[in-house]
Image (tube, rainbow, N blue to C red):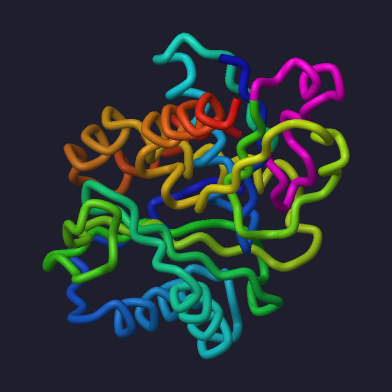
Amino acid sequence: MKFSNKDVFLDVNQTSVNSFLKYAAKAAYDAGYTNDIEKLDQSFLAREQEFSTGLEDGFAIPHAKTTAVKKPGFLYFRLSKPLNWKTYDKKPVTDVFALMVPPENAGDKHLQMLANLSTALLEKDFKEKLRSLSSKEMIAQFINEKIGE
Amino acid sequence: MNVVGVSACPAGLAHTPMAAKALEKAGKELNWNVKIEQQGMMGPVNAISQKEADAADFVLIASDQKITSMDRFKGKPVIRVDINTCIKAPKAVLKKCAAAIKKEN
């Protein structure tokens, strides 16, 4: 699993969490992570309904665990308009990582990278540096450096 | 303080390692020994041994999920806390748990 600039989406303009999740499922299809947009969207939605994946400082990490996922991975979305997402600090969301895994045999190496990404989001430095980068290439390179392979 | 615990979330993907890391980091800041086992998709990560369990002042379960191998913690005070609260305010969680244990004793 290598995070590439094709996994980065900038200036994303969505008006609600639900419409965003649909958009993310479509983006995952375009990036080759799924053949079933509807099923992936439903999985994101079901997890969100269980409990919001909003964190703090404007980040959210929706995730899908479903057979609709062909290969484990994640996408990064930077929103042009903040979304009203339920978060720890009640701040709206501007940056989203969408995580996707199949229910079985995701592979420990891939799971470790997703774990590394999640724990990186506990660090202020990671979030600030990520936001300071403006090109897809630089963003992909920075994320790969931080979560390792 | 000596604290051991387990984190687990529905997908076992993101919040499990986040809660474990957040609590361990908060432990370091408090100068406490905090070790949290992650029961996620990868199976047990950073597993708590019987010896470590025996030495603990209390056990923190950061989850509303079913936790495996709870028999390790027999006889120890066990406190369950919502996993999101552990990520959001790890230091406050540790301190509150410690205060609750002191009150009991």
Q: Quadrant of residue A14?
A: bottom left
Name the side, left or right, on which A72 lies relative to B95: right
Q: Position of residue A142 (x, y in %)?
A: 37, 34
Depth check, front residue: A145 or B21: B21
| Residue B78 seen | yes
Q: Residue at x 43, y 36 (%)?
A: B93
Please provide the residue range marked out in magenta.
B38-57
Q: Residue at x 42, y 35 (%)?
A: B90
Relative height, residue A119 to residue A29 (above, below): above
Q: Position of residue A137 (x, y in %)?
A: 32, 44
Depth check, front residue: A6 or B38: B38
Q: Quadrant of residue B55?
A: top right
Q: Residue at x 83, y 36 (%)?
A: B74
Q: Residue at x 48, y 83 (%)?
A: A41
* Residue A29 falls within the magenta-colored stretch: no
Name the side, left or right, on which B9 lies relative to A78: right
Relative height, residue A31 to residue B3 (above, below): below
Give the residue at the far top of this rendering.
Answer: B31
Name the side, left or right, on which A74 lies relative to A17: right
Relative height, residue B91 to residue B87 (above, below): above
Give the residue at the far left of this rendering.
Answer: A81
Quadrant of image for the C terminus of chain A: top right
* Residue B50 falls within the magenta-colored stretch: yes
Q: Position of residue B15 (x, y in %)?
A: 52, 50
Q: Position of residue B7 (x, y in %)?
A: 63, 44
Number of marks:
0
| Residue A145 seen | no
Relative height, residue A94 to residue B28 (above, below): below
Q: Quadrant of residue B45?
A: top right
